Image: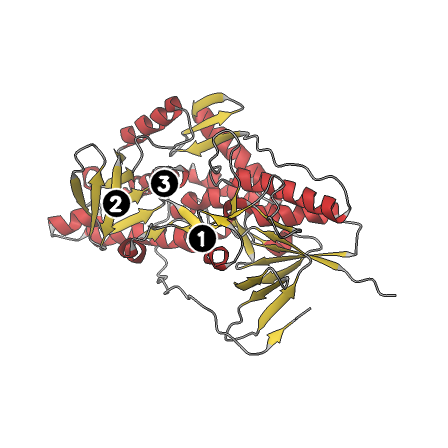
Amino acid sequence: MVRVKKRIVVLGGGFAGIECARKLEVLFRNDYSIEIVLVSEDNFLLFTPLLPQVASGMIETRHAITSIRTILDRATFYEGRIKNIDQYGNIVTLWGTTEKRGISIHYDYLILALGSQTNFFGMSDVELHAYTMKTLNDAVMLRNRMIDMLEQAENETNPILRKSLLTFVIVGAGFAGIETAGELLDLILDVRKYYPNIHRKDLRVIVLEALPNILPGFSDALAKFAERKLEQKGLEIKLKSVVTSFDGNEVKIKKLNGDSSSEAIQTKTLIWTAGVTPVNTIKRSTFKMDHGKIIVNDFLEVPDFPGVFAIGDCANFLNPKTKRPYAPTAQLAVEQAKTAAHNLHALIKNREKRKFVYRPKGQMAIIGKRTGIANILGINIAGFWAWLIWRNVYLSKIPNWDKRLRVLIDWTLDLFFARDVARLKFFKKPTELEYKVLDEVDDVW
């Protein structure tokens, strides 16, 4: 008699999806009646904390990613974009391409870890003209853009145009915005020596934030330290400032200072890091949602669908103290992945599941060269030691030893050599909204 395998499908190749798949491999390492499948749009795990350093040229592009196939041991991997999730028929369908047919994968158990995408809050002009910092391509495109602006400004004689070329605006003062601003400021200050006609006073890097403070989540003391250090380096921070439009030449701002005054900044480069929203695949599904995220119970299981779990940015799990969703961090995603894997194993083995309880280990951010802030187990650390701790902690979290070594070498070389100003002429492709739909569907179980 042939024993039918049970299939667990994990959707998403980010921190949550990869950690969950790895944990499931350990839990079911000797149980060959269980098949584990991971589906991701990319065939690599992007180590997002290194993205700002890729954009500044400190880290070589490929060193910020790790092939998923080198991380997993026994899971079956599919690279593809998800077309549809049929939670009643237990089928996940992947789009085909011009080269291959679509695939439909049947599942017995499902883990949703599809992450999030950039949220432009309905401003189509900003979405059209702004740069983002969500993917590896975003970081490469942004680095090319920064160097391109310096090249154009070096020999530009029109002072107004030259000023707009050398003004860079980052929207959002959370982790992504502040770390990106710090790295980009370091980049242009380091490479300025190659552009004799560009002086320090010509360069402007501006951060816009709607809240009255930067780095929400950190203590006031650490946030103020970061703000002071960045301003000493020349970064301009405008708080209580909301972007209303950007046409590629001018960003318009509404000030939240009581009189709703407005301001305009002439710039050719706006970097948007101001918010995220669940991916469209989740929004198109029929799971019960709150604010675009899938509602889950205390065990991270989706109500009405036993054996279906949602974790990471696409799950709406509330902080029991504040009754508000937790901030979408990699730390939270990894902890949820571990709990979801445990509970799925318990469900299959008829054991007791455990509730998800989040205990943050701390927060860290780097704010430029050899300076950072950190809160670890309630202890505030600022300056060089926080920067050093950040490097050691994130270096230890890179999945493979070879990539850890490569990143360490990049960091070491940065101490002795200047940044490279060679610009790779990649051009931004229009986003492909849908893959080609083919009649024949492959691999249907």
Task: Tell me if residue 179 can be seen.
Answer: yes
2 or 3: mark nearer the eye: 2
3 or 1: mark nearer the eye: 3
Instruction: Check whether the beta carbons of the residues at disc 2 and disc 1 lie within 8 A of each other.
Output: no
Q: Residue at x 36, y 45 (%)?
A: 273
Three-letter residue code for mark 2: Val
Residue tagged 1:
136
Three-letter residue code for mark 1: Leu
Point out the tag, 3 or 1, that comes first from the N-terminus: 1
Q: Locate residue 256, reporting x and y percent.
A: 23, 35
Q: Locate residue 107, reporting x and y percent.
A: 67, 60
What label does residue 66 carry, if any? none
Residue tagged 3:
177
Split into 4 quadrants, where in the image is the N terminus?
bottom right
Q: Locate residue 151, reporting x and y percent.
A: 25, 53
Three-letter residue code for mark 3: Gly
What label does residue 243 carry, if any? 2
Q: Residue at x 43, y 40 (%)?
A: 414
Q: Is residue 406 left or right of residue 230?
A: right
